[in-house]
Amino acid sequence: MAQNTEIITKVDIGSDHRMVRSRICINKRLERPKRIKRKKPPRIDVRQLEKVAPIFLLELQNRFEVLANESPSIEILNESITKTAAEVSKKRIETEEEVNTEDKVIEQLEQRRKELKKKDNKTRAERVEYSEANKTVKKKRRARARRKRKDFVIKKVENMEEQLNVLNNISLESGLKMHKGKTKYMNNFESNKDITIDKETIEKVESYKYLGQTTYLKETTKEEVTCRIRAGWSCFGRNREIFLDDKMPISLKRQVYDQCVLPTMTYGCQTWSLTKATTQKLRVAQRAMERKILGIKLADRVKCSEIRKRTQIQDIVDFVAKQKWKWAGHVARFKDNRWTLRVTEWQPRNGKRSRGRQARRWRDDIVKTRGNTWSRDARDRDEWKRDAEGYILQWMDRAS
């Protein structure tokens, strides 16, 4: 390619020709033929695959169930099997020696931490050592729990039955026995088949109670609030000798109520999807208890504000709103990818919305107060605390 071409007229060359000066650029790079990149087949560790054979079979079965509705070709099936084998063979199972070594390390750190805790006059270096040992023990325990955890998505009753039988066999080897009468199961897919363990049928339920909180497949707050109110009345009845005694001072009754009855009625309230109906139910139950404490009947026509002035009991809606706001900030500040944060931020990609008004979600009232950026705003702890009053006031206005 010629560039900057010019004719030089000042030079006499003894001819009618002209001298030309130009800059020639030559591209020395030759175009190479493009190579067709072939995908390298994934490496499969056969020895490791033999160790995790049950996991491989389960993953393979799930893959085939997904491909069953797509009528795949032989190439796609072959690729799916190869990919599944490669992914599963990368999963590493800890040996007993590694587990014992890590347990010894955690035990030594805990022992050193206990020694430093008992020591009264610690030096600065010992305080730093105690703090670091405490953090390391917690990190190692969490990492150990994550490695042990195996999450399976069960789409058929047969898979559920197979896993329960495996659990039953492992329990028997360890000297434990599964109580078939107390074992229940719940699923969110349609199936008419029963689950049997050792020729005993396991009962299918629509709800179950775990750690004092009832879990349902659908919206649970309404039923859970009813259960909590029932538990609150039960606690109130166990302490009726204090609440119904006219000689007892109101300050003592208030203290017993705030320390016993109120925590019972609001157990797990951080996970509730608050609505006007649920808050009204809680307020009605609390006012009925206050009238019992003061010996007032509905026929006496005493205002609720006057009853609250006498008892000075903490408002239950105020307490629930504070607990939920604190928990929302705590969840937003999680830095690891734990299930609590993943479920809160999860957005469904498939399915259709049902007709009619949609069920209230856990974060709807928080979004109404702080907007869609609430999880980002909650990282500032001081600002989040200051905004708590505005969130509580919206529920105080609705419930009043």
Image (cartoon, helix red, strand yellow):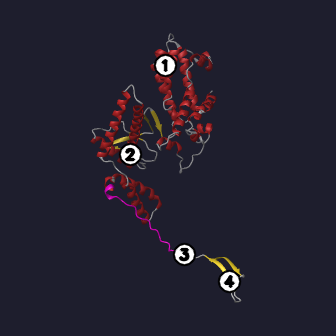
Cα–Cα gap, marks 2 and 1: 44 Å
Callout 1: few (<14), some (14-19), or many (20+) C-alpha neighbours within 10 Å?
some
Kindly identify which residue carries mark 3. 28
Q: Which residue type does callout 3 highlight?
A: Lys
Front-lying residue, 13 or 251:
13
Q: Which residue type does callout 2 highlight?
A: Arg
Callout 4: few (<14), some (14-19), or many (20+) C-alpha neighbours within 10 Å?
few
Q: On the picture, is 318 further left or further right than 53?
A: right
Front-lying residue, 272 or 38:
38
Secondary element at image label 2: helix
Kindly identify which residue carries mark 4. 19
Taking 154 as reference, is 231 above or below it? above
N-terminal label among 3 and 2: 3
Taking 385 as reference, is 24 above or below it? below
User: Mark 3 near mark 4, Cβ–Cβ under 8 Å?
Assistant: no
- Quarter assignment of residue 125: top left
Kindly identify which residue carries mark 1. 256
Q: Which residue type does callout 4 highlight?
A: Met
Residue displayed at 46% across by 23% down: 234
